[in-house]
């Protein structure tokens, strides 16, 4: 009697295991196609990155940002020179 109950319970488990193995096999056939698509998207983003970086507006913004960063760095590290020039300038404070 116990063997019959075990065999009866094992049948549905084997069906589920078979379906899982079949699904894994299907997924393994799809993975190479997805890999090719990911490579294509990676190439497209690299081309977009080159295009954006070559844009003159981006270059101008980068130059202005670099100048502002350099001015802030010099303002914070050179106590006597830049602040003295600013304080002695005729510009309103």
Image (cartoon, helix red, strand yellow):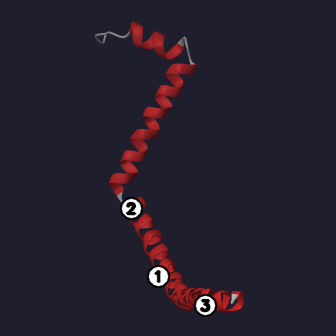
Instruction: Tell me the CA gap for discs 3 and 2.
Output: 65 Å
Mark 1 packing: few (<14 Cα in 10 Å), some, or many (20+)?
A: few
Task: State the residue at coordinates (42%, 59%).
Answer: 53
Mark 2 packing: few (<14 Cα in 10 Å), some, or many (20+)?
A: few
**Quarter of the view holding residue 20:** bottom right
- Is 15 in front, or is 28? 15
Q: Nearer the viewer, mark 3 or mark 1?
A: 3
Mark 3 packing: few (<14 Cα in 10 Å), some, or many (20+)?
A: few
Q: Kindly identify which residue carries mark 3.
A: 8
Instruction: Tell me the CA gap for discs 2 and 1.
Output: 22 Å
Q: Residue 12's x, y, as percent?
A: 56, 88
- Residues at circles 3 and 2 in contact by the CB criterion of under 8 Å: no
In the rendered structure, the answer to whether residue 29 lies left or right of residue 56 reads right
- Residues at circles 2 and 1 in contact by the CB criterion of under 8 Å: no
Compared to 81, does 12 lie above or below? below
Query: Quick one: which residue is furthest to the left in this view?
Result: 92
Q: Which is more N-terminal, label 1 or label 2?
A: 1
Q: Nearer the viewer, mark 3 or mark 2?
A: 3
């Amino acid at each position: 009697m116990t063997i019959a109950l075990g065999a009866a319970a094992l049948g549905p488990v084997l069906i589920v295991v078979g379906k899982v193995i079949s699904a894994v096999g299907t997924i393994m056939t799809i993975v190479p196609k997805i890999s090719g698509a990911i490579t294509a998207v990676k190439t497209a983003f690299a081309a977009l990155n080159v295009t954006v970086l070559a844009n003159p507006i981006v270059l101008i913004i980068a130059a202005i940002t670099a100048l502002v960063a350099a001015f802030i760095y010099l303002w914070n590290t050179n106590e006597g020179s830049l602040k003295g020039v600013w304080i002695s300038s005729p510009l309103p404070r």
